[in-house]
Amino acid sequence: YAAYELPDAPDECRLYLAAGDITEMQGIEVLVNSENTYMQMARIFETRSLSSKLRWHGAQKARNGHVREDTVQQELYEMVKTDPYMLPIQLGSVVPTHAGHKDSRLVENGARYIFHVATVAVRLNPSDDLEPATNADIRGAVTSCLNEVLQVDKVSGRISPENTARWAEEEAAAASYEAIKSIIFPLFASGRGGRETEADRRAITQTMLSSIRDFVSRPRNKARLKLKAIHLCAFS
């Protein structure tokens, strides 16, 4: 990766440009997942997509390697059943989940949360193509993810629906909650999202970088944001 200082950012906050597989990276607390507006993750055997890799590496496995609990997708479905989420969610909206089962690879890597952000619109007519996010949608998605960091910190990690077993665990752990220090973004809409040309990738990258810079430089955000590392990752 390459590290850069961000002008007018909170103290010690750096931007990192990385290449590689997000699910193999160590010590990053929030993994951002580019998802469709119905929050249906890619099937586990569709191994080329980030969504399928997060689903696979966040699952609970039996000794033979088979999936015992589809942890991330199950939690995501639980989340979108509750307010303030309704399906399909709007482009740029974020739904947070934990990073998977406590024994999963993602959690062992140090991930705490996955932020599922809608960057591809699914049409009601099955014959219609997926609609990728525009640059304006991408700017909104980046901003939503960084705002979600502030929100999760504000509620001390209580992200689950109330009166659930997971929420009770979050409530018990709230007193020892530590603010989020790191997050990693993929290049939105640049894979299965449909914007795959070199010109598209340049525009997406520039939009995401400028959105990050704008967010962290706002005085109100600087005062509340505890992030030390913001990663932008291209698979290759």
Image (cartoon, grey):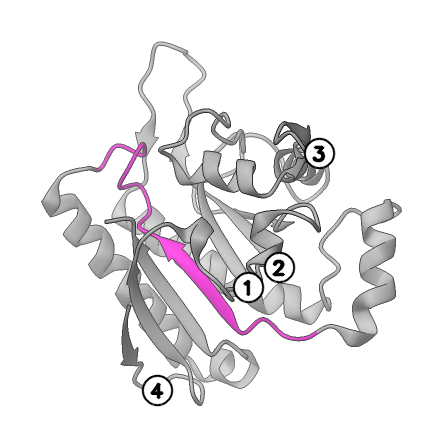
Q: Are marks 1 and 2 in contact (CB under 8 Å)?
A: yes
Q: In the rendered structure, does residue 180 fall within the stretch colored magenta?
A: yes
Q: CA distance from mark 3 to mark 1?
A: 25 Å
Q: Residue at x 89, y 47 (%)?
A: 163
Q: CA distance from mark 4 to mark 3?
A: 39 Å
Query: Which residue position holds label 4?
Result: 8
Q: Earlier in the sequence, mark 4 or mark 3?
A: 4
Q: Earlier in the sequence, mark 1 or mark 2?
A: 1
Q: CA distance from mark 1 to mark 4?
A: 23 Å
Q: CA distance from mark 4 to mark 2?
A: 27 Å
Q: Residue at x 71, y 55 (%)?
A: 159
Q: Which mark is residue 29?
A: 1
Identify the amino acid type marked 2: Arg
Q: What's drawn in magenta, residue-wise?
A: 178-195
Q: Earlier in the sequence, mark 3 or mark 1?
A: 1
Identify the amino acid type marked 1: Glu
Q: Residues within 10 Å of mark 1 (few under 14, many from 20)?
A: many
x and y percentages locating residue 178 in the rendered image? 68, 75
Query: Which residue position holds label 3?
Result: 81
Q: Earlier in the sequence, mark 2 or mark 3?
A: 3
What SS does tag 2 mark? loop
